[in-house]
Amino acid sequence: MAMQDGVPPDMTIAPGGDVLENPRRRDYLNYAAVSVAAVGAGVVVLPLVNSMNPSADVLALSSTEIDVSAIEPGQAIKASFRKQPLFVRNLTAAEIAEADKVDASSLRDPQTLEDRTKEGKRNWLITMGVCTHLGCVPLGAGEGENRGPFGGYFCPCHGSAYDTAGRIRQGPAPTNLVVPEYEFTSDTVVVVG
Amino acid sequence: MSFPWAKHYEPKQPLMKWLDEKLPLPRFVYNAVGAGYPVPRNLNYFWNFGVLAGVALVCQIVTGIVLAMHFHSSAAGAFESVNVGIMRDVNAGWFLRFAHANGASMFLTVIYIHMFRGLYYGSYKAPREMVWLLGVVIFLLTMATAFMGYVLPWGQMSFWGAQVITGFFTAVPVVGEWVQVWLLGGYAPDDATLNRFFSLHYLLPFVILGAVILHIWALHIPGSGNPTGVEVKGEQDTVPFHPYYTAKDGFGVGVFMIVFSILIFYAPDYLGHADNYIAANPLSTPAHIVPEWYFWPFYAILRAFTADFIIAAKLWGVVAMFGSILILFFLPWLDKSPVRSASYRPMYRIAFWVLVVDVLILGYCGGSAATPGIVITSQLASAYYFAHFLIIVPIISRLEQPKPLPNSITEAVLAKKGGSQVTETALSA
Amino acid sequence: MLPLFIRSIKFLIGGAFVFVLGLALFGTVKTAITEPEPETAEHAMHKHPKDLKLASDGVFGKFDNAQLQRGFQVYKEVCAVCHSLNLVSFRELGQLGYSEAEVKKIAKDWATKQPVFDDKAGTWGERDNLPSDRFPKVYYAGTGTPPDLSLMAKARHNGGAYIYSLMTGYDEKPSAEALKKFPEFAKPAEGMAFNPYFANLNLSMPAPLTGEGQVTYADGTRATVDQMSKDVAAFLVWTAEPHAQSRKAAGFAVILFLLFATALAFGAYRTVWKGVKH
């Protein structure tokens, strides 16, 4: 700029006409102010993002009590846990035997029935009713539904088939049906979550 | 338009050059609020409030979008979704709600100061009439948005506010009753009302945003005004917006945020009304209903008209209340004085300060119960309000003998600061 | 040159507004003189709430959990018979220092049960409350359902002090001077009680806290009427905004940060403008 001619190299002229010393020195304060403002803006985003996490009332519904006394061997019910379907199935002796027959190490997601049930309650198979492929609800819990080629559950969306231990045996699903945390508070009452 | 000495945007990196060719958005920003916009060097702190209004608008839009994710727009669920869902259960929900509710007050406060700044310094005069007109449009849209937002929590004041404000329209002869039913979508505020208000409350801020862009565009044609009201004569009168006014606005935003935070964290209900913590009850009206504080002056004008004359008192009140804002659209043509700034207009300056006090009195009256004393005061204050714009200002603008104006902004600055003529000559050399 | 009419239209409109306001003013003044509004009983007898100091007041206010638990006990044993707390969930009691098991027990033992609709039978039944439930609504047969207390401390001006004053205000009778003007207040209407802190002066709720020892505090605090009133007021201040304490704490940090950031911004502003006369 022409109007700065004749000014020493570490000086500059402000638009008001004053000669300023080394304009670089004053930059630090500006950098500090801008950085602090950026930090502030960043911190303000946190509550906005956090507000989209599950709220306290949703988290409070995280455990469900189920009375299993009415489920006969071979039958299953669909319950609801965290607004998702939950399968509670009373396995028959034949179904347990069939699950045990399989060599776990040969499976896509190697687990035994033992791993997936509570000790002394091996007949109670409690899993999420959510296909691990893309989240459809598999068939097999309701009366007369198609249980698929392995006698467990069958997902109609993309053909994933689960066996009597809820393990993935065929189709695109990558893992077994998820077993949620639960415990039997009595012989007939199970608390999930 | 820009001044011939405005700096030009010159992208240096290849990416910025490429972007400038394909979509010159950075150039646009540079010329709008960057180094490419020369601004008078003598702006005082009252010129911060335009940017602050923009900041307040952005705060409202951001908090509003997140709040809308948690709000249930139904007469049965709205009160609970606000007072249980948002206020208790949603993470940081109380912060969002208080920030949004008090943000409306901050927004209107800033707008009022911005408008009075315009009234004092004659910012509405040629060549900036369009800036002023768009500003009044923004003010109207903001009031509509604020009113509809206040209805959403569906408390007692929300409900009765909706009832009373839509009731204004019943003052219109013949079609009035039908208009109110149409506005409410029923015979009283209910689901239909709440849903349409929610829809419009979400829409209008974006309309305001569009109007703000036009407002800034219109401003950039003549360039910003200044406290002397003397137009820019040359480069020595201006500084580039960035970094000079961005730095000053940064400080202004800091002060704004401090005041805002004190409201949110320590007085979140101070500007609200206790009755809005009671769920809407269509069968019982609160004893003392008042709108939010920013409507008080207009509410006082509405209530001041208690006499029938040719048309019913109620219609006078409604016409006067809307008229008190619509007058502002005509202000550029009501004030014919060629001098902009009240600093050089001794008579107008007195009238301006009387108007400020008058509006404050109207505000006080609008927020108080309508006792005879308050009604009498509102009647006198309303009369001054109309007289100011329609009679006093037009007459003053003819009679007044303005003080001598400085030759230029720079001369005024140097006279004020007693600055040396040496730098001045150095600069012009 | 515009015709004179167009040029003077502003004066005509302005004059019209001023004229009509003048008419209205004349009417108001005339009415005020010829028919002065009689003094109302509310004006003569209504009192502003007494002072109430709570631990949660002020910038650094913190809830006093012991007091809140006492207040909850008063609510549970006295108020809950008629007034619900429907916007509050049992789980929130955890914030008062109750353990998870205690909250569970409070919910389970709560006298009013949670209504449930039986889809198959098509009838309403009830079940015990769970911590995740909100306090059930109370329906009070007779004079209509008394107001919910969840937000009472915010729904009245100076709510905490108002509740405390209302609870302790039943003993205050109208002054002899006021009674001379409004003799009907000598004896409250059937089923009503006089209370100078209530907006209408007469309310259908008889004094709920009547004598010392009405509740037995677990922490051994003497349960005077004044103490119980303070405690229940403190509890309802908490129910109205359980997050008030974290709000104030967050505010302190935010404002400190903003003061620092604004000071820096001011420094940056002054250095940018250094030497520029304006």
Image (spheres, rainbow, N blue to C red):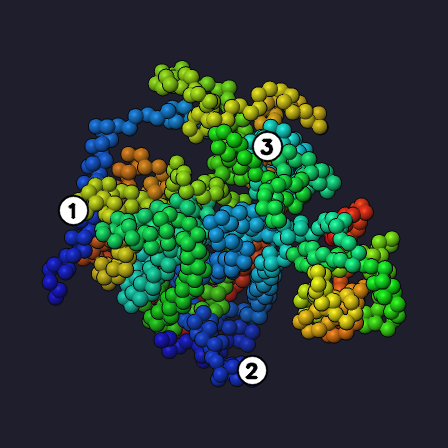
The reply to whether label 1 and label 3 mark residues of one chain is no
Disc 1 to disc 2, C-alpha distance:
70 Å
Q: Amino acid at mark 2?
A: Leu
The image quarter containing residue B370 is: top left
Q: Tell me the kind of residue under disc 3.
A: Ala
Using the image, determine if residue B383 lies above or below residue B421: above
Could you give the CA–CA distance between mark 3 and mark 2, rounded to whole angstroms? 69 Å
Q: Position of residue B4 (x, y in %)?
A: 37, 78
Left or right: B198 with respect to A121? left
Q: Residues within 10 Å of mark 2 (few under 14, many from 20)?
A: few
The residue drawn where x is 34% and y is 42% is B366
Q: Please state the chain letter of the residue tagged with numbered disc 1 in the rendered image.
A: B
Regarding residue A11, the answer to whether it shows in the image is yes
Q: Chain of mark 2?
A: B
Taking B370 as reference, is A126 above or below it? below
Q: Is residue B360 left or right of residue C212?
A: left
Q: What number is the disc on residue C80?
A: 3
Name which residue type carries label 1: Ile
Per the image, the residue denoted by label 2 is: B15
Residue that label 1 marks: B310
Q: Is residue A43 visible?
A: no
Mark 1 or mark 2: whose residue is earlier in sequence:
2
| Residue at the image point whose x is 68% and y is 70% from the top | A156
Q: Residue at x 66, y 34 (%)?
A: C69
